[in-house]
Amino acid sequence: MSTVLRSIFSIFSGKAANLLISLVFTPVLVRIVSQEQYGLYVSVFAGFSIFALLAKGGLFDATRKVIAENVTEQKTVSETVSVSLIISIGYGVVAVSVATIAMLIGVVPSRYVPFVWILLLAVVFGNIFSIVRGTFYGQQREHVAEILHVGRRVFYVVVGLTVAYIGYDLQGLFAAYSVSFVVIGIFGIAYVRRHFEFSIPSIEKIKEHGPEVATFGGFQLLGGVSAAFLYKADILLVEYFRTSTATALYNSAIVPAEMIWFVPSIIQMAFLQHTASLWAEDDIEAINEQIRTGVKYSILALTLFGVGLFALAKPFLQVYFSGNYVAAADTLRLLILGTFFFGISRVIVPVFQVTGWVRHTELMTFGALLLNVLLNVVLIPRYGIIGAGLGTSISYVMLFVGNVGIWFYSPFEVVPLRWTIPFVLAQGVFAVVFLAIVSIVEVSSLVSLLVFPPLGLVLFVGINVIFGYLPVQVLRDRVKAITKQI
């Protein structure tokens, strides 16, 4: 199995495990806490996730990029790890200090303050954990990073749901979240220490490696924070203009809509370090082939999951979240349309980011963020969560258009229309047939989720095999390769 496929498989395994954890966590949580509490939980995490991302300074991506470019130089790798750890701890301490001052002078809304105090513990250890993951990603040992990541999620979910159930509610959940980073962060550093000889770096080493790590991390931070705001601004604005109950409803649409990014997010995570290695070797054709393959399988996955969820929006919300959340079905469908295009963007953006186009992609993301905020400010007061879904989807589509524009000006080959048009038409055939079947056959919500997804999978595979986009022999080879790897 090639290194990129091995990386994708490792990340897929971790993502799949985390998805399963989320699939269990969310429906249990919404049945333990009230709808209003769930809305508050969502809004607190939306704000904190942006703050935590700022505190990380883009160092996860910077660390894995620099290590991937110097993977054969053990001394350089060890020095990079040491410098990255020092910088990440410094960023964390500064972030905690700023947050503390903000709470003391009343900048943070009083209803959030008790939760933020609890979550601050996660900042420094979360930074440390991001360097641990970046180290193993850069070495293309993604399976180790994913095992640690899944372990942290399991700890949080098990402990968090337990303490919430026995009466500690949101305080217990946030405490479990913070402690999970402390425990796994310490364990992760101990594991890295077994593979690298690192210590407190000298001033000379910080001057040597620090600028590269911090500079690339800074550019990644600009795009990362813009992307985080792009994901979370609508949630925060719904909370501001409406109520916690409306926030809970909107998040019940956001959660499944973002699930259709599953495969593109895996490819995105694998492409950055692999593209960095290929770019260092000046292997443009290999990067072109990587992009073509990534786009193809991203569109296939987005079509399969997106069409399925679009057709089964109401049954999914009914069974997964409960009947109180079915009102979010139309918002979910709107979000799926936007997330389809955003999912494709996630595949090509990491390629641009490590090949000299990072400023352009970050500016595109920032522009989409501004558009998203503007549309949400206009639409949410008038149309509620439907307006939020519409504004967010439009901004996602515009981000896709902008990144395709960068693609045309980059040194990489754009996927030709003579291939794209019949490929998209084949996916359209699947969408029309599956949507027609679901609309004609009337069954209960639970039966719909048991019957239609496997039927859709068979239909999807059959159509794409007929059109030649899923060659049978290639499927067999991939299954054999994955089985052998397992």
Image (cartoon, grey):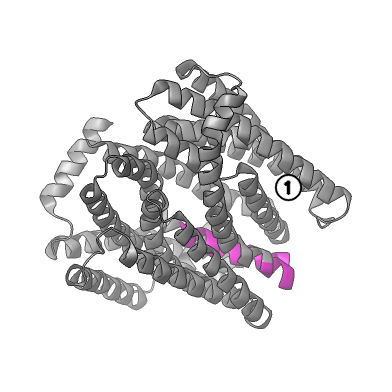
Q: Is residue 220 magenta?
A: no
182 vs 12, left or right, is: right
Identified at 78% across, 41% down, the residue is: 97
Residues in magenta, as a range: 237-258
62 vs 232, left or right, is: left
* Snapshot quadrant of residue 35: bottom right
Residue 73 higher or lower than 218, as above or below: above
Measured as percent of width and height from the top left, residue 9 is found at 32, 40
Measured as percent of width and height from the top left, residue 384 is found at 64, 77
40 vs 192, left or right, is: right
Q: Quadrant of the C terminus?
A: top left
Q: Is residue 248 magenta?
A: yes
Measured as percent of width and height from the top left, residue 137 is found at 42, 35
Specify the amino acid type for callout 1: Leu
Q: Secondary structure at mark 1?
A: helix
Residue 29 higher or lower than 369, as above or below: above
